[in-house]
Image: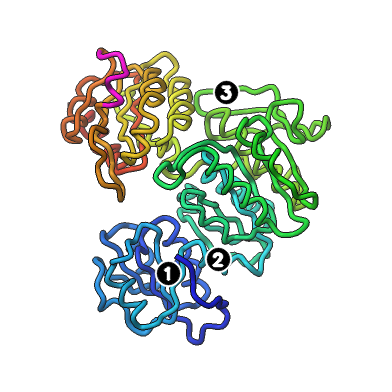
Amino acid sequence: MKLEGEISLNELVNPKVHFIGIGGAGMSGIARIMLAKGFSVSGSDKNDSSVIKSLKVLGAEIQIGHSADNIKDCQLVIVSSAILENNPELVTAKQKGIQIAARAQALAWLMSDLTSIAVAGTHGKTTTTAMLTVALQSAGLDPSFAIGGTINTAGTNAHNGSGSIFIAEADESDGSFLAYKPSGAIITNVELDHVDHFADEEAVFRVFEQFIDSIKQDGFLVACGDDLGVAKLLKRVKRKDLRVLLYGEGSNNDFKIERIYLAPTTSVATVSNVGRKIGELSLAVVGKHNLLNALAAFAAGSALSISEEKLLTGLKSFTGTRRRFELKGEVAGIKVIDDYGHHPTEVAVTLTAAKNLAQGGRVLVVFQPHRYSRTAAFASEFSSVLSAADFTYLLEVYAASEAPIPGVSSLTISKGMDASKVIFEPSMLKVVEEIAKNAKSGDVILTLGAGDVSSLGEPILQAIADR
């Protein structure tokens, strides 16, 4: 959905903006920044949430449920990508001739006058964006930011900063990140996902190639030199003005991590730049993937001429984001972790971190596949990576906005696994009951997926406590 007739937010008189689908991670962040800038913000969403309540406290007028009556005297309507064309508010806005913009276009406007860094990649972009934000804050800067997840220490996913830098998570899922035109960018990795939008791997590479082309003249690109997808992508890049900085473990990288030590709850490595040892990268989050995410943030901070010492100190203070290997609690020696992972690659690294945390205890997984299209495309890969768990409870597919695909369900995944290590159980209530009954001291329970499986952490902890 594109805006007809380009405008600038600065051109709006007594700016009044309405958000259709204001409760989403990306939409709520933009609304939060606009409220801080003095815009009059209204919005609607199908469900109430803590996010909506916090926006109301900040002054937003929000209705639960979509209705034509919600479109009043606004000058601009911003629409979530999840909103269908027949939405009554969208239909009414078109009839009234009100300017309409997609979420990505609105974020691009907010970034346009600042030094902007867009963080993209199939996996790890939320954490990397948050890490860069925290590192710059620790260095004494006050960047604006918009992230698809809540930073634990800040308790928010967006902020209107006083500084000249804007850091944004760049979601490739529908190609809308091409609107950003950033000063610099990070690409963590590239592989096929979002099969509801991309027909094949080539389509993914095309949109990432366009993303690189959208970086401003003489900008910079930080990219993971260890990733096969990134290596393939960079061979397609024709631009000569970009400053390209590679990071990873391999000898071809400008920024390298070595002497990696992965403890159950921390991660440590040494950092070097073109053979020059910089210092120790020490994180309060787990996994080699997070060391690489932090190295990407460090490289981007260096490209912005931020002190290396301050960047390392800032990254050390990072404690994670919500729904990214988030400890929900511990009862009777049993830890419950919640994670957003919903692609086989993400599931694999999360399980590796969980097994390291368990230190010999079992890893029990509650997995909820996200979208029928992704389940159909990656069923065998899910079967393979989930087999690393000691036991997996499979919930039914979380449809998101998709219609069911005949013959595709979580049973498709379970059929490729050892029957003694998996059970398909569509009832969340039953899963909570069963996993609480079977868990024992030393076990790690992992609720995994991008749907409402995230709601099970507290009930599981309570059920264990009530045993």
| Label 3 Cα crowd, 10 Å radius (few <14 / some 14-19 / many 20+) | some
Element at badge 2? Answer: loop
Element at badge 3? Answer: strand
Mark toward the start of the polypeptide (1 vs 3) = 1
Q: Quadrant of the N terminus?
A: bottom left
Q: Residue at x 28, y 22 (%)?
A: 414
Dots 2 and 1: beta carbons under 8 Å? no
> Residue 356: x percent and y percent?
48, 20
What is the C-alpha distance between the residues marked 2 and 1?
18 Å
Is the residue 296 above or below the residue 257 in the image? below
Residue 318 visible, this orientation: no
Tag 2: residue type?
Asn
In this picture, residue 463 sits left or right of residue 450:
left
Tag 3: residue type?
Leu
Q: Residue at x 23, y 25 (%)?
A: 435
| Label 2 Cα crowd, 10 Å radius (few <14 / some 14-19 / many 20+) | many
What is the C-alpha distance between the residues marked 3 and 2?
35 Å
